[in-house]
Amino acid sequence: MMIDESPDSIAIIDVREPWEYASDTGHVIGSRLIPMNEIPENLDELRELSASRKLGIICNSGQRSYYTAAFLKQNGINNVFNIDGGIIQWILSGLEVEYGSGADGK
């Protein structure tokens, strides 16, 4: 699913590793980094965030984000979707990215 809604109604969760998030590939502007292996310990925070916004899950190519979105749905977080093709497809679609680890690592 590609994003065709207001950016304010969606929170982008990047499930790549910190080194990938900060790499030359870049990351979605305003995205929040939560590596895939840290998703289980952040379920309460994600549940709360999903009450007011859709969660768009992104990784490098779409595989980790697919499994993460499925895991979240299995855990009762249904306001979530996988960003097909990951950051690679995001960039190929001409959408903007930013570089670095982010001011607060999120």
Image (cartoon, rainbow, N blue to C red):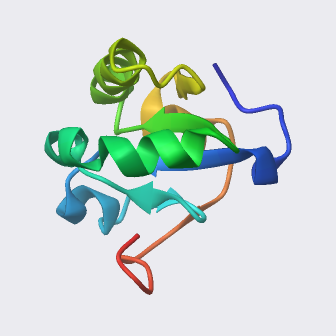
For image coordinates 41% across by 69% down, the residue present is 106
Rendered image quadrant of residue 20:
bottom left
State which quarter of the image contains the N terminus: top right
Horizontal side, residue 91 vs residue 33: left or right: right
Horizontal side, residue 56 vs residue 32: left or right: right
In this rendering, is residue 101 above or below 25? below
| Residue 54: x %, y % from top left | 65, 35
| Residue 36: x %, y % from top left | 22, 40
For image coordinates 32% across by 41% down, the residue present is 43
Q: Nearer the viewer, residue 61 or 6?
A: 6
Asked whether the viewer can see residue 14, the reply is no
In this rendering, is residue 57 above or below 94? above
Q: Nearer the viewer, residue 46 or 95?
A: 46
For image coordinates 45% across by 33% down, the residue present is 86
Residue furthest left in the image: 37
In this rendering, is residue 92 above or below 83? below
Asked whether the viewer can see residue 41, the reply is yes
Horizontal side, residue 65 vs residue 10: left or right: left
Residue furthest bottom in the image: 103
For image coordinates 27% across by 47% down, the residue present is 16
In this rendering, is residue 74 above or below 37? above
Horizontal side, residue 73 vs residue 63: left or right: right
| Residue 75: x %, y % from top left | 34, 20
